[in-house]
Image (spheres, rainbow, N blue to C red):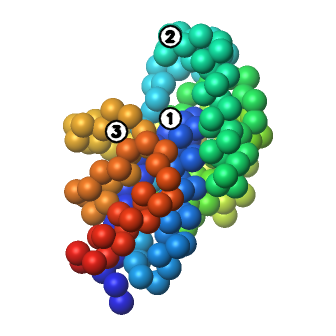
Amino acid sequence: MPTPIKIDFVSDVSCPWCAVGLKALEQAIGCVGDAVEVELHFQPFELNPQMPPEGQDTTEHLVQKYRSSLQQLEQNRAVIRARGAELGFTFNARDRVYNTFDAHRLLHWAGLQDRQTQLTLKHALLRAYFTDGHDVSSHEVLVNLAEEAGLDARRARQILGTATYADEVRALQRFYAGQGITAVPSVIFNDRHLIQGGQSAETFERALRQLAVAA
């Protein structure tokens, strides 16, 4: 059996390049096949930790945050849509940006069950926001997505109605910030090797093969 390669995928569910990066990483994992065994863990990062409960208009938010013109925003959106389409992910128009802290609490809980459940929930959250345009801060939406991922809906509702896992998520955010992570996606291999941004599947595949040889 090959030595497992641990991958910490630090990301936010409202980050389009995180969706691109995850699809590319999964494609790379599929390409290397049995040559590597991967342990994929999702770690929390909030692009907009101060986002209010009602969210903010997407265009207004992006113009304010990045000082971009409307033309630049549309060009960026076109690039992201194209990259997503190449990887089999659909980006549709989104009206608002939402707070994602509760989504990260559910992802943390899912990770305590098993890695596959966490991965399934991550995909559900990304699809809900970027493809379907849902409010991923809504507890009803989150409970439905948790159930879709195979988690207990009643327990999901209990978690969201309390501060359960809030301290754990914040501690992880502080840890990765302390490691110098200021942008996502940040993909950390075996706690040592970092690849940032929505890189190509070829970039991830090359890293996996190099790590497999070095193991």
Residue at the far bottom in the pictured view: 1
Check disc 3 and give the amino acid type: Gln
Say what amino acid the circle numbered 1 marks.
Phe
Real-space CA distance between mark 2 and mark 3, rounded to the nearest whole angstrom:
26 Å
Q: In which quarter of the image is residue 69?
A: top right
Instruction: Give the amino acid type for the residue marked by disc 2 in the picture.
Output: Arg
x and y, in percent, of residue 177 in the image:
28, 36
Instruction: Judge depth for marks 1 and 2 and give the one in front.
Output: 2
The earlier-in-sequence mark between 2 and 3 is 2
Residue for badge 1 = 101
Going from N to C along the chain, the mark reached first, 3 or 1, is 1
Q: How would you rate the neighbour count of disc 2 (Cα within 10 Å): few for under 14, some for 14-19, many for 20 or more? A: few
Q: What element carries label 1?
A: helix
Q: Residues within 10 Å of mark 3 (few under 14, many from 20)?
A: some
Residue pictured at 62% horizontal, 20% vertical? 73
Report whether 209 appears left or right of 159. left
Q: Where is residue 1 in the image (x, y as percent from the top left)?
A: 36, 89
Circle 3 residue: 173
Does 181 sit left or right of 206 as displayed? Answer: left
Q: 5 or 141: which is nearer to us?
A: 5
Label 1 packing within 10 angstroms: few (<14), some (14-19), many (20+)? many
Disc 2 marks which residue? Answer: 67
> Left or right: 92 with respect to 212?
right
| Mark number, residue 157 | none
Whether residue 44 is visible: no
Label 2 vs label 3, nearer the camera: 2
